[in-house]
Amino acid sequence: MLEKIGQPGNERLSSPQMVTVEQVGRMLENGVEPVIAEIGVGLGATTLELCKLLNGQGKLHIFDFQEKVDELAEDLHQLGFKNVVAHGNTAKYWDSYHWSLMKLWNAVRTPVFDYVFLDGSHTLLHDLPAFFICDKLLKRSGLMELDDYEWSYGKSRAMKKIRSDYMTSEQENAPQIKMLVDTFVRDDDRYEPIIANRLYRKR
């Protein structure tokens, strides 16, 4: 999968999320060997930068479609990064990373993550349950990052078929991560804003 980074047509997915990389770097500087959840891996640009930064420390859990996380994990293992754990789901419409997260919570029943980067489907259908399960899995003082606050399906030509098949016009045009943040994160006293509308520390 990593060979797709930088290829024509993949420009938007070829740059790592630097907020994530910088925040994890600060954790390492403070002596934390972080356990990270990356939910939605794209082409693996952020995943690769995190692996380079961790350099074998901590652990990186990746969540996405099974074939994507398997291919990405194998690419990273071939580069010597052995601290990547793949959690895959099928492409069935009601299946998602929230199912993988639920299985993980049922297995551990305790907070394990120092950092959660939620960059998945950008729908309440999948991201709302994922957020609440991640909240259970996130340690106190851990960081929750939610990407694409203003994005909506109505703005994306690539998502036209999904929009027309599965969403009302209201849902198409709603920035659903904004709805999640505004309704469930911003006014929650357990979360301290670090970067407005994007990054929150769990108290």
Image (cartoon, grey):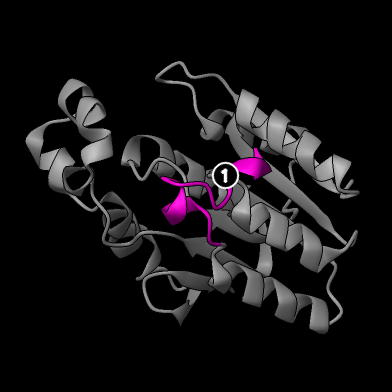
Seen from this angle, which residue lies furthest left? Answer: 169
Nearer to me, 77 or 126? 77
The answer to whether any part of residue 103 appears in the image is no
| Quadrant of the image containing the N terminus | top right
User: Please, is residue 137 above or below residue 107 in the view?
Assistant: below
Q: How many residues crowd around disc 1 within 10 Å: few (fewer than 14), some, or many (20 or more)? A: many
Q: Is residue 2 magenta?
A: yes
Residue where numbered disc 1 is placed: 43
User: Please, is residue 59 above or below residue 23 in the view?
Assistant: above
Residue at position x 55%, y 19% in the image: 90
| Occupied quadrant, residue 29 | bottom right
In-image side of 42 versus 59 (left or right): left
| Occupied quadrant, residue 158 | top left
Residue at position x 48%, y 49% in the image: 131
Q: Read off the magenta span.
A: 1-15
Magenta residues, dominant SS class: loop
**Residue 31 position within the rendered picture, expressed as x and y whole percent measured from the top left:** 87, 79
The answer to whether any part of residue 101 appears in the image is yes
| Occupied quadrant, residue 32 | bottom right
| Quadrant of the image containing the C terminus | bottom right
In-image side of 147 versus 144 (left or right): left
**Residue 78 position within the rendered picture, expressed as x and y whole percent measured from the top left:** 87, 40
**Residue 53 position within the rendered picture, expressed as x and y whole percent measured from the top left:** 78, 68
**Residue 57 position within the rendered picture, expressed as x and y whole percent measured from the top left:** 89, 62
Seen from this angle, which residue lies furthest top? Answer: 92
Seen from this angle, which residue lies furthest front? Answer: 8
Residue at position x 42%, y 55% in the image: 12
Q: Is residue 156 magenta?
A: no
Residue at position x 16%, y 39% in the image: 171
Q: Disc 1 residue type? A: Leu
Nearer to me, 72 or 183? 72
